[in-house]
Amino acid sequence: MTRSRLFLILLAATALAVVAGAAAWRHRVDIAEALGVASSLGLTRPAPIAVQTHDPLGGLDPDARALLTAPAPVAPSPFLRRPWISPDAFCKALEAVGFKGVTFQQGEPPQRSWTCLTDVLKPVDGDEAAVSSLFFTARGAEGDRIDGMRLKLNLLDPATTPAVKAVAKDLLRLVFRALGWEPPQEILDAIDASRDEKIEDHGVTYDLRREFGEPPRYNLVVTFPRGLGPGGVDRFLPLPRRPAQTPFLLEGAGGASGR
């Protein structure tokens, strides 16, 4: 056995003996204190050893310390609105609000896309090229959800424009209530005021824009989120897709009628 190895063995044995001795001494003091004879035997606990600590941020200025030690803000993922529906049932339900010529188009397999179209709705009788009107379309890339909707307002005649706006707002209320929420009041107000408006609420984008030229025509495009967005996706377990039962739209869209 070499001298260096022998020295290490002796050093380790000495350290173990010191630790064992300290532990035995503390155990002896504990017993004596429990029996109430520690002072008569002259047994006392050793003074605690002061541990020198080093502050790793000690050399930084106060602003830097505050930035590094501030608690992390709570930023949970926002709740998003993703409507899961039966597209065919949703499309057929549009007939209840006065639309005619409602057509459901299914994509050719293996595509699962779909489109729902309606004929032009004229709340007031008259020539389609002379009176105000509207029509509605909805689309989806999958067979169990809506990805986007479009409501077009043809405000051709100032006399019939108020009726078209009223029907458009009633239609939006009925559609979104069937999906589970109310349409944003900002969009309803923008339809009344005939102005452009774009907002995002719970991941849903509502974009009302006027087309170029005369007479005024407006398109409201509603785009639903197709994913959860950045962050948080790995916290959710995948579930089998199951189309939710689509509640039928309520009848009576504020006096809407179709031809």
Image (spheres, rainbow, N blue to C red):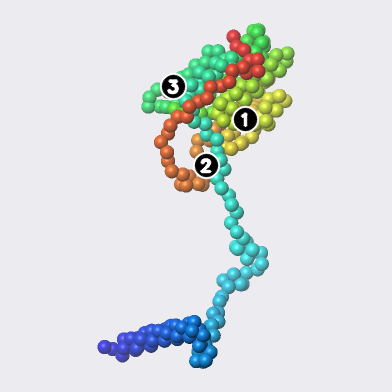
- Using the numbered discs, state the Cα–Cα distance from disc 2 to disc 1 in whole angstroms: 23 Å
In the depicted view, which residue is nearer to us: 147 or 43? 43
Amino acid type indicated by mark 3: Gln
Mark 1 to mark 3: distance in Å? 28 Å
Q: Residue at x 56, y 48 (%)?
A: 76
Residue at (66% x, 29% y) in the render: 187
Residue 11 spot, x, y in % from top left? 37, 87
Q: Which residue is mark 1?
A: 182
* Picture quarter with the C terminus: top right
Q: CA distance from mark 3 to mark 2?
A: 28 Å
Circle 3 crowding by C-alpha within 10 Å: few under 14, some 14–19, many from 20: some
What quarter of the picture does the N terminus occupy? bottom left
Dot 3 and dot 2 residues touching (CB under 8 Å): no
* Vertical position of residue 135 compared to residue 176: above or below: above
Labelled disc at residue 229: 2
Location of residue 208 in the rendering, given as x and y in whole percent from the top left corner: 64, 28
Task: From the viewer's side, name the closer residue of 129 and 38.
Answer: 38
Residue type (three-letter) at the residue carrying disc 1: Glu
